[in-house]
C-alpha cells in the first residue's frame, strides 16, 4: 500500500466510524451522544495511527534525559551515495548514530552495513521494503522484521538492535504489540525536520538545532525509502553545522539503545 492509498484508507476508516455514530443516533432518535463518541474514537484512531509519539496503540520507547546525550537517527539507507559520508563525519567527531535500515538496501549493500558498525554506529530495523503498515496484518509486520533481521545478520554476522521504526511512523492498532512480541521497541522521534523535502541544508540544520536537548531523538534520512533514489546531499551538508551546535551545547550523539529507558 503506498502513501496515498494509506492516507485515503485511514481517512475512510475514520469517516466510517463517524458515520456509524451518526447512524446509531438516528436509529435511536438520540441527539448526538453516539456521534460524539464516534468522533472521539475516529480522532483517537487517527492520532494512534499518525502521531508518532502517541502511545494510544502501545508504548513507544522512552528516552532518558541524561545530561549531554541525544540521538541522531538516519532512516531509509544504507545508500552508497550518502551513508558512508554521514558515517565518517559522525565518527571523526566522536558521535554515534542509529541507522534504521531497510532490509532490501542492506541486501544490496552489505558492505555499507558493516562499515556503519565499524564506525561505532548501530543498525536498527525500518522494515524490509518501506511499505506502509497501517493495514498490514501481524504476519506481514513479522515478515518485514524477519527479512530485515536476516539481511543484517547475513551482512554483519549479528542481528539489528531491537528497535523498530515504522515507515512514515504509521501504525495500526496491532503493530506495536506485534513488534514487541518479537522483542522490539517502537522508536519515535522529536519534532519535524523534513529533510526529505530538501528545504536547503541551512534550514535542515536550523530545524535540528531547535530540537537539540538531552534525550532528543532526531530523525534524518541517508536514503530514499520510496526507491526513487532522491538525493540526501542536503542532509550530508547540514551535518557539520548540526554537530558544531550540539558540541557547543555540550551534547554528544549516541545510539538510541544507549538512551532508551528499558
Ligand atoms: Zn522511512
Image (cartoon, rainbow, N blue to C red):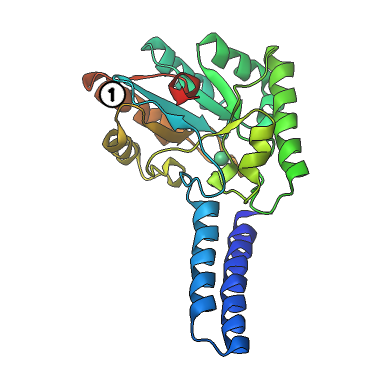
The residue closer to the viewer here, 120 or 109, is 120
Residue 141 is left or right of residue 194, and the answer is right
Q: Pointer 1: what residue?
A: 246
Residue 112 is left or right of residue 93, and the answer is right
Residue 195: image x %, image y %? Answer: 42, 41
Q: Residues within 10 Å of mark 1 (few under 14, many from 20)?
A: many
Mark 1, secondary structure of its residue: helix
**Which residue is drawn at the image coordinates 73% and 44% (left, top)?**
138
Considering every residue shown, the one lying at the far bottom of the view is 29
The residue closer to the viewer here, 261 or 142, is 261
Above or below 129: residue 57: below
Q: Is mark 1 within 8 Å of ligand 1?
A: no
Q: Is residue 228 visible?
A: no
**Quarter holding ligand 1:** top right
Residue 115: image x %, image y %? Answer: 57, 13
**Which residue is drawn at the image coordinates 28% and 23% (left, top)?**
246
**Which residue is drawn at the image coordinates 62% and 30% (left, top)?**
184
Residue 126: image x %, image y %? Answer: 61, 34
Image quadrant where one finds the N terminus: bottom right
Q: Is residue 52 visible?
A: yes
What is the tally of numbered marks visible in this picture? Answer: 1
**Which residue is drawn at the image coordinates 47% and 47% (left, top)?**
54
Amino acid at each position: 500500500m503506498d502513501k496515498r492509498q494509506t492516507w485515503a484508507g485511514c481517512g475512510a476508516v475514520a469517516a466510517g466510524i463517524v458515520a456509524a455514530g451518526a447512524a446509531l443516533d438516528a436509529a435511536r432518535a438520540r441527539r448526538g451522544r453516539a456521534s460524539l463518541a464516534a468522533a472521539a474514537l475516529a480522532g483517537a484512531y487517527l492520532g494512534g495511527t499518525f502521531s508518532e509519539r502517541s502511545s494510544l496503540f502501545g508504548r513507544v520507547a522512552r528516552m532518558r534525559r541524561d545530561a549531554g546525550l541525544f540521538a541522531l537517527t538516519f532512516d531509509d539507507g544504507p545508500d552508497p551515495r550518502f551513508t558512508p559520508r554521514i558515517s565518517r563525519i559522525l565518527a571523526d567527531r566522536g558521535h554515534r548514530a542509529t541507522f534504521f535500515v531497510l532490509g532490501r538496501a542492506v541486501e544490496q549493500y552489505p558492505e555499507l552495513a558493516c562499515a556503519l558498525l565499524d564506525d561505532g554506529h548501530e543498525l536498527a530495523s525500518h522494515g524490509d521494503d518501506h511499505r506502509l503498515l497501517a493495514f498490514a496484518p501481524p504476519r506481514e509486520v513479522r515478515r518485514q522484521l524477519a527479512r530485515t533481521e536476516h539481511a543484517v545478520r547475513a551482512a554483519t554476522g549479528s542481528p539489528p538492535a531491537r528497535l523498530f521504526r515504522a515507515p512514515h511512523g504509521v501504525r495500526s492498532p496491532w503493530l506495536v504489540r506485534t513488534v514487541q512480541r518479537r522483542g522490539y521497541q517502537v522508536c519515535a522521534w522529536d519534532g519535524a525536520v523534513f529533510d526529505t523535502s530538501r528545504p536547503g541544508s541551512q534550514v535542515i540544520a536550523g530545524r535540528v538545532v531547535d530540537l537539540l536537548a538531552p534525550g532528543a531523538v532526531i530523525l534524518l534520512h541517508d536514503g530514499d525509502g520510496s526507491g526513487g533514489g532522491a538525493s540526501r546531499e542536503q542532509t550530508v551538508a547540514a551535518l557539520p553545522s548540526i554537530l558544531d551546535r550540539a558540541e557547543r551545547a555540550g551534547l554528544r550523539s549516541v545510539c538510541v539503545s544507549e538512551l532508551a529507558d528499558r
